[in-house]
Every structure is written in structure tokens, then in C-alpha cells.
Image: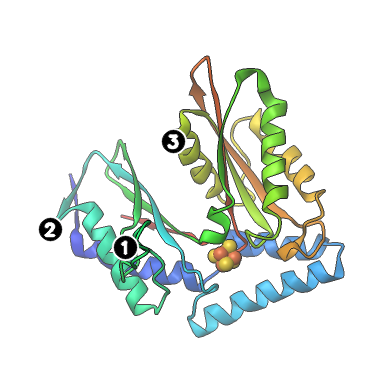
């Protein structure tokens, strides 16, 4: 049995909150640079240049890439042969978020949904916990801004809507979102499960490294097709026109009930912050 201390988790989550907000992830940077090389619109190229310059300044000055420093979403894989010493895992994550947002001077954006009273420390984090075999603890921290999250949707399609219905839903969602999620975006699509499962796998799919091929041979060409169609919309960087509306489309599927076809579209912006912690 491997033992991980409460304090070690707090410290790593704290540091990850700051790093994710200060440094554009390598896969996102590479995708933006690649798009800069293929973008046909001069304005689009200029916006992509500005995004790269903004990221360079943020990393150098250790300041946030964007003023919306997001909801601290965590996908946690907890091995069955690992023990947390000194407290509860979720408490440690929240303590880490509290310290990271305080020490990094990151905006505290979390409030009561009705009174709108701010919690004051960007907690609670959203923790999705999965129990897995082994002695590792993996935390994928993904601070998520509201501009892109607000553009996401869950739809309960009819099974007869089929693949064409799914494609239409995804493309229409990105078209209707327009400039709101700060394109170029990353589009996560969750197909199947129940209403909440579709939303969860859409977010998980969205966080797959950009440039990685979907291991499912049926989904990889579908991702490429949707990416092509989305980039034909002409929305472009920051909605000012161009070929680069999305950097990637990632799809995950899960079995569903014979009488339903849930589909979720979760959109992330060009900041697409994420940082993995491994024990
Ligand atoms: S969508 Fe992303 S880049 Fe735009 S304001 Fe929100 S966090 Fe910032």
C-alpha cells in the first residue's frame, strides 16, 4: 500500500492551480502555433499571434493567461492500493485550490448560485473521482472559464436522429456559440450514457491532449470530419473570421439505453488550462 500525505496533495494542487493559469499547456501552444501557420485570414493570424504573445507574457511574468481563472475542475483517478494520510482527499484538493488561488493572485470566481455571494477562495473544486486498480493517484486539474462553459449543451436526442443528428447538434452548437467561447476552441463531445454521463465524458474528452488520435477507429474519422466542418464555419480566432474556429474535436462514447441518445457538447477556449499531478 502506497501512502500519500494530505500535505503533499495540498502543495501539488496549489502549485498546479498557478501553473495551469500562468502557462499555456504545451499541446495547446503547439496547436495554436500550427494554426498560425495555416490560417488564411490576416486578422486571424494577427489574433493567433496575440494569443501566443499573451501566453509568453503570462509565463514570463507569472500572471494569469486570462482574467477568468476558472472553476477548479479535477478528474481524479485513485488507485485501490493507495492511502491518504492525514485527511480526506477532497479536503486536500480544496485546500490546495484555496492556497493556489490566494498565492497566485488568481480571481476568485465561485459564488452561491442564488444569492451570488462569492465563496471568497475559489472553492469548492469540482471533483470527479474514479477508483482504479494500482498504487497511483492522478489528478488532472483543469480550471474552466465561464465564457466557454456557458456555451455547452446537453441534448436528449431520439435514437432515430442517429449520427446525422449528432453531427448537426455539434456543428450548430459551435455556430451558435460564435465568438462567446473565445475561439479557437476545443470541442468535447460525449455520446451515450445518461444525461449526466454524457456531460461528464464530453468534458473528459475535451481534455484529451490535442493532437492525440482517438484510439477508437470509428471515432477518429468522425472527429476529423467534424473539425473540418466546424472550421468551414468561418468564425475564426476570437470570432473575427478565418479558418481556425476549433483546434480539435474530441469524442468519447458510452453505452446508452435502447430508447435514448444523450449527446453533450462541452466547449473549451483557446486557454484550455490543464495540469496533471501524479503520485
Ligand atoms: S472563454 Fe477562456 S479565454 Fe475567454 S474569457 Fe473565458 S477563460 Fe478567458
User: Eyeballing the image, is 177 above or below 195?
Assistant: below
- Quadrant in the picture for the C terminus: bottom left
Residue at 76% from the left image edge and 57% from the top image edge = 244
Q: Secondary structure at mark 1?
A: loop
Q: Earlier in the sequence, mark 3 or mark 2?
A: 2
Instruction: Specify whether residue 145 is in view.
Output: yes
Q: Quadrant of ligand 1?
A: bottom right
Residue 50, how many percent across, how many down? 70, 76
**Rounded to the nearest whole Å, what is the CA distance between mark 1 and mark 3?**
22 Å
> Contact (CB < 8 A) between labels 3 and 2?
no
User: Farthest residue toward the top?
Assistant: 258
The residue to which callout 3 is attached is 196
Using the image as rendered, state which of residue 74 and residue 193 is in the foreground: 193
Q: Secondary structure at mark 2?
A: loop
Q: Earlier in the sequence, mark 1 or mark 2?
A: 2
Residue at 65% from the left image edge and 63% from the top image edge = 182
Residue 271, how many percent across, how many down? 58, 64
> Contact (CB < 8 A) between labels 1 and 3?
no
**Rounded to the nearest whole Å, what is the CA distance between mark 1 and mark 2?**
20 Å
Hey, which quadrant is residue 29 in on the image? Answer: bottom right
Q: Earlier in the sequence, mark 1 or mark 3?
A: 1
Using the image as rendered, state which of residue 67 and residue 28 is in the foreground: 67
The residue to which callout 1 is attached is 123
Apparent side of residue 79 relative to residue 21 in the rendered image (left or right) = left
Q: Which mark is residue 86?
A: 2
- Quadrant in the picture for the N terminus: top left
User: Eyeballing the image, is 123 above or below 158?
Assistant: below
> What colouring does the structure picture have?
rainbow
User: Eyeballing the image, is 268 above or below 32?
Assistant: above
Q: Alpha-carbon neighbours of circle 1 within 10 Å: few (<14), some, or many (≥20)?
A: many
Q: How many marks?
A: 3
Amino acid at each position: 500500500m502506497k501512502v500519500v500525505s494530505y500535505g503533499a496533495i495540498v502543495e501539488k494542487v496549489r502549485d498546479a492551480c498557478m501553473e495551469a493559469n500562468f502557462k499555456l499547456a504545451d499541446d495547446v501552444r503547439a496547436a495554436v502555433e500550427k494554426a498560425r501557420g495555416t490560417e488564411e485570414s490576416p486578422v486571424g493570424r494577427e489574433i493567433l499571434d496575440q494569443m501566443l504573445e499573451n501566453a509568453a507574457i503570462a509565463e514570463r511574468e507569472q500572471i494569469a493567461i486570462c482574467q477568468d481563472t476558472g472553476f477548479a475542475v479535477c478528474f481524479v483517478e485513485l488507485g485501490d492500493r493507495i492511502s491518504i494520510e492525514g485527511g480526506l482527499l477532497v479536503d486536500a484538493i480544496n485546500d490546495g485550490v484555496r492556497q493556489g488561488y490566494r498565492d497566485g493572485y488568481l480571481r476568485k470566481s465561485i459564488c452561491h448560485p442564488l444569492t451570488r455571494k462569492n465563496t471568497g477562495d475559489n472553492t469548492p473544486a469540482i471533483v470527479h473521482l474514479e477508483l482504479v486498480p494500482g498504487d497511483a493517484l492522478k489528478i488532472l486539474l483543469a480550471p474552466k472559464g465561464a465564457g466557454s462553459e456557458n456555451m455547452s449543451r446537453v441534448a436528449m436526442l431520439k435514437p432515430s436522429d442517429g449520427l446525422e443528428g449528432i453531427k448537426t447538434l455539434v456543428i450548430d452548437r459551435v455556430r451558435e456559440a460564435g465568438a462567446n467561447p473565445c475561439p479557437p476552441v476545443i470541442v468535447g463531445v460525449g455520446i451515450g450514457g445518461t444525461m449526466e454521463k454524457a456531460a461528464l465524458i464530453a468534458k473528459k474528452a475535451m481534455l484529451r491532449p490535442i493532437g492525440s488520435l482517438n484510439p477508437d477507429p470509428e471515432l477518429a474519422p468522425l472527429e476529423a470530419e467534424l473539425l473540418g466542418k466546424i472550421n468551414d464555419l468561418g468564425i475564426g480566432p476570437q470570432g473575427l473570421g478565418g479558418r481556425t474556429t476549433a483546434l480539435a474535436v474530441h469524442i468519447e462514447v458510452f453505452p446508452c439505453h435502447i430508447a435514448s441518445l444523450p449527446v453533450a457538447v462541452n466547449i473549451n477556449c483557446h486557454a484550455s488550462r490543464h495540469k496533471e499531478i501524479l503520485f
